Image: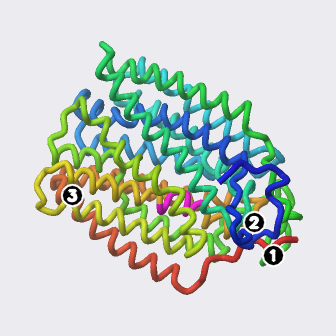
Amino acid sequence: MYLADRRTTTGAVGRNPAPGRRAAVPATVFALGTVSLVTDVSSEMVSAVLPLYLVAGLGLSPLGFGLLDGLYNGVSALVRLVGGRLADRRDGGHKTVAVLGYGLSALCKPLLLVVHGVPLIGAVLAADRTGKGLRTAPRDAMISLACEPADRGRAFGVHRAMDTAGALLGPLLAFLVLRTAAEGYDAVFTVSGCVAALGVLVLWLFVPARPDEPTGLGKPTHPGGPGLRLGERTPLRDLLRRPGVRRLTACAVLLGLTTVSDSFLYLTLQRRLAVTEAWFPLLPLGTATAFLLLAVPLGAVADRFGRRRLFLCGHLALLGAYGLLLAPLGSSPALACAVLTLHGTFYAATDGVLAAATADAVPREIRGSGLAVVQTGQAAARFVCSIAFGAAWTAWGDRTALGAAATGLLVSAAASAALLRPPADVPPEPAR
């Protein structure tokens, strides 16, 4: 795997690399990966301590935390379409909207120092997620446009691995800050804000406004219809008329409705193992480690054997994590390792893989909008799941709530397999 410029991205698009030649990962992917790495250090520092800060520190009930956690994801869902549409409207728009999103999130981190009531914390989290919603589709569009269609799974895997390196470092840094600083939570929020600002600076200085696209892409057209002009309006209903987009969105929604948020999974594991407050921020490290190690290999597997199939298999790994938490296996450290490994495998097999599969189904002129449609459906479904799971936990307890989620995930996976079975993966864009 190596950096590639215009001279190393030639060749017919959609074809496998020549024997003995490894697929190039463009410099734009590495630059965006660095931005995500730095930003995730900041975000995961907050995410690692936020559940315990709200539940143990502020005395929030599981239902109240579910509402806040749902808001954390739901606001992101509402603005993703806006971010995708704005990014597609003009040349260079992807970077502009991404900078806006990353910048807004960076501004929110220091605000956690001065807000303490639940409503104000909710408002800050909503603004932070607005930034994430704005930046996600444009960033993924830049990744997909910079690489060969046949290598998208690998490229997204590289990006997600770098992103996850930040997710690995963030909780570790939060753990160290909590153990050394007198005002632990305030110190975490301060350091997080500084790191987030660095991520925005890297994006502004080192990511090109127009990524160097593979020379084989040629004119901006897509099989199955005429080329689209830059900025041409494409209503949501027209995107959903595309069979690939419609099926992927339906599956993302079905599976998202039963995907318990990371925070709830860590809280469940913490109760099962009686993890102390000081050690709680380290739980996400297990997920991040597995994600980091598996993102690139599973991305390459997705390119070879089918991105949609791997996406479904990833949810079976999540189902296995639920099963281990429900099984009467005691409270050994091995249980924690197994659950977190399966959780990380789930992300490695689904996060970048879904983006790569969506990129296959959408013309590159409206790539940001198409990615936003699928991502919005998934985020909105997870928003509903967070609220429902928090209510179920409050009413019936964590085990019953998790059992209901596991049953729903099994049914959703079966339904999604039926939805995705008839059509094969959309073939890559041909060279023109």
Picture residue at 23% right of the left edge, 64% below the top: 323
Picture residue at 89% right of the left edge, 64% below the top: 219
Picture residue at 31% right of the left edge, 23% below the top: 178
Q: Point out the tag, 2 or 3, that comes first from the N-terminus.
A: 3
- For mark 1, what is the residue? 225
Relative to 357, does residue 142 appear above or below in the rendering?
above
Determine crowd level at label 3: few under 14, some 14-19, many 20+ residues with C-alpha closer than 10 A.
Answer: many
The answer to which quarter of the image holds residue 180 is top left
Q: Point out the tag, 1 or 3, that comes first from the N-terminus.
A: 1
Q: Which residues are magenta?
A: 349-355
* Amino acid type, label 3: Leu
- Residues under numbered marks 1 and 2 in contact, where contact means CB atoms less than 8 Å apart: yes
The answer to which quarter of the image holds residue 381 is bottom left
Distance from the alpha carbon under mark 1 to that under mark 3: 48 Å
Q: Which mark is residue 363?
A: 2
Distance from the alpha carbon under mark 1 to that under mark 2: 9 Å
Residue at disc 3, secondary structure = helix
- For mark 3, what is the residue? 325
Closer to viewer: mark 1 or mark 3: 3
Residue 397 as seen in the image, left or right of residue 240: left
